[in-house]
Image (tube, grey):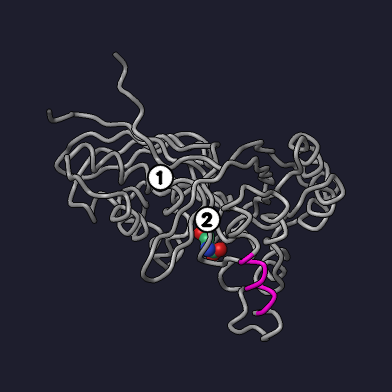
Amino acid sequence: MTRGTVTATAPATSANLGSGFDVFGLALTRPVDVVHVERTRETTVEVTGRGSRHVPTDPAANTAGVVADELDAPAAIRIDKGVRPASGLGSSAASAAAAALALDELYDLGRSRESLVRVAAEGERVVSGDAHADNVTPALLGGFTAVTDDELLRVPVDLPVVACLPDTAVSTRDAREVVPDAAAMSDVVETVGSAAALVLGMVRNDPALVGRGFRESVVTPARAALVDGYERARDAALDAGAHGVTVSGAGPAVLAIPPVGGVRSVAEALVDGFRAAGVEGVPYRTRVGRGASLPEPDA
Ligand code: HSE
């Protein structure tokens, strides 16, 4: 049966996780973007919701519009943003992932989620200048993911996660410019050790090991300088017992792994830490979640 309109949702995601710059990604249960698509001859884009005025509606400059073009699936696209743009929570990826899934369904393309990842990553190119897939992969596949040139690796994970989004913005382009071109071998060794701990922690659902795996000394310190209040928020969360704290994606959101029973106290600590630096923050008490989905149409 041909459907006239399709709705899909896709979650916020957190990329890098400290030791996995441009490789690791995590799907969160909230917030989410909701994307509605309807068949048309020419693609149009309309955006409502959180930070919508900062999202381009020119289809060639919007991640969902680029996805429609890549799939040769023109549509009237309506995006209801739950994931604020320039947040470090995969806002553009959420729109791209939801659009890819919705358009695949609308046009009955039968594409695999893995092939939709590559399409959605092209949407990312218009935002950051690079078709990196570390947000769109968890946004489509869910769980913890690792992206290499050849493979999309995924494991399901059951862990609580706390994110805090300060009321500031960091552009991905700016955040990529501060990343050093080279790293000392001692830093590479530290990063590999952390990445190994993090992967094992994800496989075992072990929050202490995952938090330990956030540690690295090349990308995060360079980026932390762009996030007002980061040090205070991080230190407050660690004092509250967080196993690890890092910049989420390109920032300014911060991601923390709480101890068992410590979700609320870590969330409050992050908010208090930012506030002590004069920055208001929105806490998200969330979990590792599933990828984009097609809610059942109303009966
Ligand atoms: N890995 C990317 C970065 C994610 O940190 O620049 C941002 O979209």
Q: Where is residue 6 in the image (x, y as percent from the top left)?
A: 27, 31
Place residue 297 in its image quadrant: top left
Of mark 1 and mark 2, the one earlier in the sequence is: 2
**224 horizontally vs 141: left or right:** right
Q: Give the range drawn in magenta.
A: 189-196
Residue type at mark 2? Gly
Residue occupying the point 72% across, 59% down:
212
Label annotation for residue 279:
none
The reply to whether callout 1 and callout 2 are in contact (CB within 8 Å) is: no
Residue occupying the point 63% across, 60% down:
198
Label annotation for residue 25:
2
Place residue 283 in its image quadrant: top right
In this view of the protein, which residue sits in the foreground, 257 or 68?
257
Q: Where is residue 133 in the image (x, y as percent from the top left)?
A: 42, 60
Q: What is the count of numbered marks?
A: 2
Is residue 35 shown above or below 65?
A: above
Q: Where is residue 92 in the image (x, y as percent from the top left)?
A: 45, 50
Q: Is residue 277 magenta?
A: no
Q: Which mark's residue is nearer the viewer, 1 or 2? A: 2
Q: Distance between the residues labelled 1 and 2?
A: 16 Å
Mark 1 lies on residue: 95
Q: Does the magenta stretch include residue 195?
A: yes
Farthest top residue in view: 299
